Image: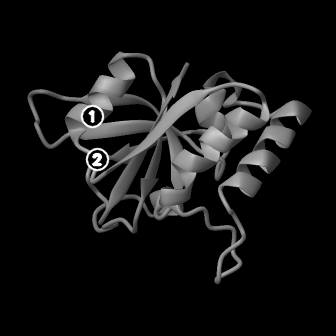
């Protein structure tokens, strides 16, 4: 989640970022679930971000949009506003096996690619904590559910 708040740090997380990450984990109830495997539920992300901002004496408005549309992704990226994209399990048929690592994960949406001559070619560029380099690409809509967490700083 720190990558959404500070997307310029995508290639290296500083010690201060580690504190922010720990605060995000606490306020978003990461690891505080019945599975105990580091899950952050999407519906905890928006209020958790607002709580972290409060902790640092800042304000923001964070909100969730479920079943994210392509136009919502384009609007946020075109306005230079990274967002958190949480996805459910993906349909992996026909895709490289290594992309499976991003299935069922929250990552920061930072860009998109759309070949208008092929309307089905819609890709979302993300920063993720699950890989290095931290930038990856996801085929739009290749998941069974999605949540976009938008953050607007006051």
Q: Position of residue 5 (x, y in %)?
A: 63, 30
Residue ID at (69%, 63%): 30
Q: Is residue 18 left or right of residue 25?
A: right
Above or below — where is 41 with respect to 64? below
- Say if residue 147 shows up in the picture: yes
Q: Position of residue 84 (x, y in %)?
A: 49, 42
Q: Which mark is residue 72?
A: 1
Using the rendered view, name the quadrant where residue 77 is placed.
top left
Quadrant placement of the N terminus: top right
Label 1: which secondary element = helix
Classify 10 Å Cα crowding around label 1: few (below 14), some (14-19), many (20 and above). Answer: few
Query: Mark number for residue 68?
Result: 2
Q: Nearer the viewer, residue 83 or 125?
A: 83
Give the residue displayed 53% in from the left and 53% down from the top: 106
Position in image of residue 26 (x %, y %): 76, 56
Residues at discs 1 and 2 in contact (Cβ within 8 Å): yes
- Depicted 75 relative to depicted 13: above or below: above
CA gap, disc 1 and disc 2: 7 Å
Image point (34%, 18%), residue name: 78
Whether residue 58 sits left or right of residue 55 in the image: it is: left
Q: Is residue 145 above or below residue 117?
A: below
């Amino acid at each position: 989640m720190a990558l959404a708040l500070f997307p310029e740090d995508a290639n290296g997380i500083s010690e201060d970022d580690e504190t922010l990450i720990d605060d995000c984990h606490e306020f978003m109830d990461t690891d505080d679930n019945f599975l105990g495997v580091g899950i952050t539920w999407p519906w905890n992300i928006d209020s958790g971000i607002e709580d972290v901002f409060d902790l640092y004496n800042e304000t923001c408005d964070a909100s969730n949009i479920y079943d994210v549309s392509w136009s919502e992704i384009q609007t946020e990226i075109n306005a230079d506003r990274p967002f958190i994209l949480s996805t459910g399990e993906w349909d992996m048929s026909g895709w490289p096996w290594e992309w499976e690592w991003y299935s069922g994960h929250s990552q920061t949406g930072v860009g998109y690619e759309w070949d208008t001559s092929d309307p089905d070619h819609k890709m979302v560029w993300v920063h993720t904590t699950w890989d290095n380099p931290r930038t990856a690409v996801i085929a739009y809509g290749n998941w069974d559910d999605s949540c976009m967490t938008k953050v607007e700083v006051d």
